[in-house]
Image (tube, grey):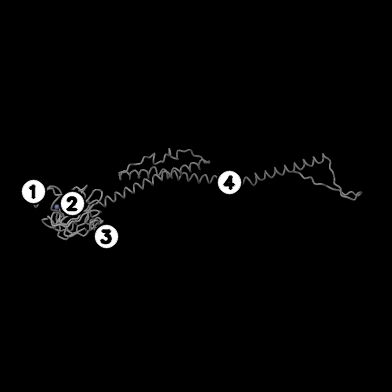
Amino acid sequence: MIFRKKKYHFNPVSLRYEEIITDRKRRLRNFFSYLVVILAVTLISGYLLNHVFGSRETRLLESQVKVLNRQMLVLLNKGRNYSASLRNDIFKKDNHYRTILQIDTLDYSFRLAGSGGSAAADGLSLQSNITNQLDNLIRKLNQQLQIQTGSFEAIYRKAQDYAGYNSHLPAIQPVSQNDLIMISSNFGIRSDPFLFMAQVHCGLDFVTPVGCDVYATGDGIVTFINYSRTGYGNEVVIDHEYGFGSRYAHLHDIKVKAGEVVKRGQVIGSVGQTGRATGPHLHYEVLYQHKPVNPAIYFDSGLTREEYAQIINKASNEIN
Ligand SMILES: [Zn+2]
């Protein structure tokens, strides 16, 4: 709105300041004069803002947007490399581990979390779709990593089971090779030393001097102890889980109790001649599903004397 300023002049006759009244044409001309001046000022200000001050800020912003686009593109490419690494390396190794541990392998379409193809196949431009592609890639990677984490956990549990199975298996000789004089009877049919007729011998007979240490051949729990002058004599039976058990007979003495948890290599007694025995020896049986099997099948034949000693020492240290 234009405020017209009143003007006055001094009237020497009336001795008063009186308002100067302009005519209509003059007021109209004044109005257009103001309008032209305002328009000119507005146009010049706009020009200055856009072409002198504004352009510099715009150029700066455009430059920053380009830098951000480049940085997002770098991130996108890094993400794609991780995705490729998952597909080409981790997924293959994971399925390889699953095969070794006899776990069903995972289908690749499942591993890709229904992504419907790689992100690299998407169209790329330096515009706003970089953000969408980045967001999409991160989402896919997150889903794939969740699946992979679950798979590794399943593999870890299975590997732990497998390690437990290995430590429980009755897989070492129950007497030291240093003490062993001979194996007098093998598993199978033999001539019974008392009856002088063919009988099935359900274990192995290890001949050593009386008093030599007898070791638990695998981790387990002592389920049976018997002191007797007949049959197996002084006897220990260990349950190794996974269907396996072991029996140690004709012992001189017994150093474990029923219900005791034992480790492979732990001393459970000593070699004797108790029960139905013609001389000092350890009668050793391995049981699978409660039936005697040949213990020699489960011995780790590749074990050296040093490795055997390490197992005994390890068990001794764990107990003490
Ligand atoms: Zn025997």
Residue 196: x and y, percent? 7, 50
Instruction: Assign a secondary structure to mark 1.
Output: loop
Q: Which three-letter amino acid code belongs to the residue tagged 3?
A: Ile
Q: Rounded to the nearest whole Å, what is the CA distance between mark 3 and mark 1?
A: 44 Å
Question: 265 or 27: nearer the eye?
Answer: 265
For disc 1, the neighbor class at 10 Å (few under 14, some 14 to 19, many from 20) is few
Identified by mark 1, the residue type is Met
* Secondary-structure class at tag 3: helix
Name the one closer to the observer, 308 or 17: 17
Mark 4 or mark 1, which is nearer the start of the sequence? Answer: 4
Residue indicated by mark 1: 197
- Which label number is shown at residue 310? none
Among the 4 quarters of the image, the one containing residue 278: bottom left
Vertical placement of residue 300 versus 26, above or below = below
| Residue at the disc numbered 3 | 319
Q: Residues within 10 Å of mark 3 (few under 14, many from 20)?
A: few
Mark 2 burial class by Cα count in 10 Å: few <14, some 14-19, many 20+: many
Q: Which residue is mark 4?
A: 61
